[in-house]
Amino acid sequence: MQARDRSPAAVDWDSVRAQFPVTRDYLYFDLANKCPLPLFSTAALADYVDKQQRSGGDKAEWFATIESARGRFATLINAHPDEIAFTKNTSEGLNIAANCLPLSAGDTVILNQYEHPNNVYCWLNLERRGVRVKWIGGGAAGGATDAGGSATGGGATEGGASTGGGAAEGAGGDGGLVTVDMIDSVADETTKVVAISSTTYAPGTRNDIESIVRYCRDRGIYTVVDAVQSVGTLDVDVKALGMDILCTSAHKSLFCPHGIGVFYARPEVRDLLDPVYVARAGMGMAAQIEYGQISYTLDQSNNAKKFEIGNHNYLGLTVLDASLAYLLALGMPNVEARLIDLNAYLVQRLTGAGYRVVSPADGPWRSAIVCFRARTDAQSARDLHGYLERNGAITTLRRDTIRASLGIYNNESDIDRLVDLLRRYGTESAEPSEAR
Ligand SMILES: Cc1ncc(COP(=O)(O)O)c(C=O)c1O
């Protein structure tokens, strides 16, 4: 397999930061939730809106932009454009996977307790067809809860379901790494799918997808990867990792408004999938009623477009095309290296200030997400989150931890200012808030 170039030119991160007006007013540590729109995105957005306002827009131009975005996204993850379909979001892609893979009564799907609820419900929904979910850590699904978006997997306890991960000192968990051994302990001849995040939404552990895929491929098990916390922050290479299906959204680290997702399937699996919904755009020989050619042969495209339904989100895809051009110019190996450096600095400063990091603190399992707990059990994460927000530091509360997620606009000074706030938390000088 051809290795991708991993030594692109150095990046001027200050000029990258200048693209993000949010950095003037906020300490923005919330990219794992949603993005602050950068200038390169808003310029594309404004141009689109202006053209549509003045002329109604140009559909031929929009179609060309979609194909450009498709090509750029394929380059981003080292795929072929024919393997890429645009969706609404990650959840839609996961539902396509769940409903189109050839599964029948008696088959099982393996999940783990660190999945986002939307990589749980779509599989639980198959139970009415007799497909069962098996949880790593044992037990039946305990039902996904909504408090901070966490899903519980029955008997699995936080930190009790995984090993390794190099969790930081003082950590409350072990990073939540899902290993091949853990999958092997629940897999049997009924297992047809392992659905897993390449990076968990909390605590941000990067799973060893390559090893998991190798294990699964040898046993005829499909791998469905929720990659929304990896694509755009880490260098994702689908050819190297080998997963069957990957799903992501563009409103986080791909710097788009909400409403754009991407679904990738490797050709051998893509061609097995029969779309649940179909429309003209997904037909190889579409009926051209407008031009007098009326033929309704159900002739699905032999590429991933067969999953695309009706008009696209042209505005969103126009922004995606622009943001992909920007990220590709930076080079994903550069982006990943920068964010892992910032991760290391953040973990070091947090632990130095007495905060308990629960994400992997070193090694290959780190990502652009760092989750931590307050200094003492008496301090609630919710209270700490509110304090940070009132002081202009935007994070999210996830799984009863503070999730600080990093983006290409963050720098060491942001981290120093965040940690200054954290050092003051619980002291008399903490409130009222000072200038942002
Ligand atoms: C890991 C993970 N999967 C899935 C989702 C759901 O994404 P969407 O609402 O874009 O489908 C999220 C959203 O935060 C997430 O973090």
Image: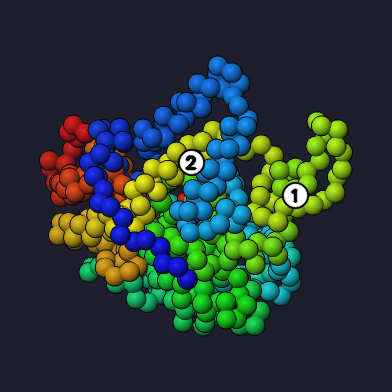
In terms of depth relative to the viewer, which is nearer, 12 or 209? Answer: 12
Task: Give the percent coordinates (x, y) of residue 339.
Answer: 29, 54
Identify the secondary structure beneath mark 1: loop
**Circle 2 residues within 10 Å: few <14, some 14–19, many ≥20:** many
Question: Is residue 245 in view?
Answer: yes
Mark closer to the observer (2, 1): 1
> 376 above or below 254?
below
In terms of depth relative to the viewer, which is nearer, 339 or 415? Answer: 339
Question: Is residue 378 in view?
Answer: no
**Residue under numbered circle 1:** 284
Task: Give the percent coordinates (x, y) of residue 178.
Answer: 44, 72
Task: Give the percent coordinates (x, y) of residue 9.
Answer: 28, 52
Q: What number is the disc on residue 320?
A: 2
Task: Give the percent coordinates (x, y) of residue 432.
Answer: 19, 34
Q: Amino acid at mark 1?
A: Gly
Q: What number is the disc on residue 188?
A: none
Q: Amino acid at mark 2?
A: Leu
**Circle 1 residues within 10 Å: few <14, some 14–19, many ≥20:** some
Q: Residue furthest top?
A: 54
Query: Distance from label 2 to label 1 (Cα)?
Result: 25 Å
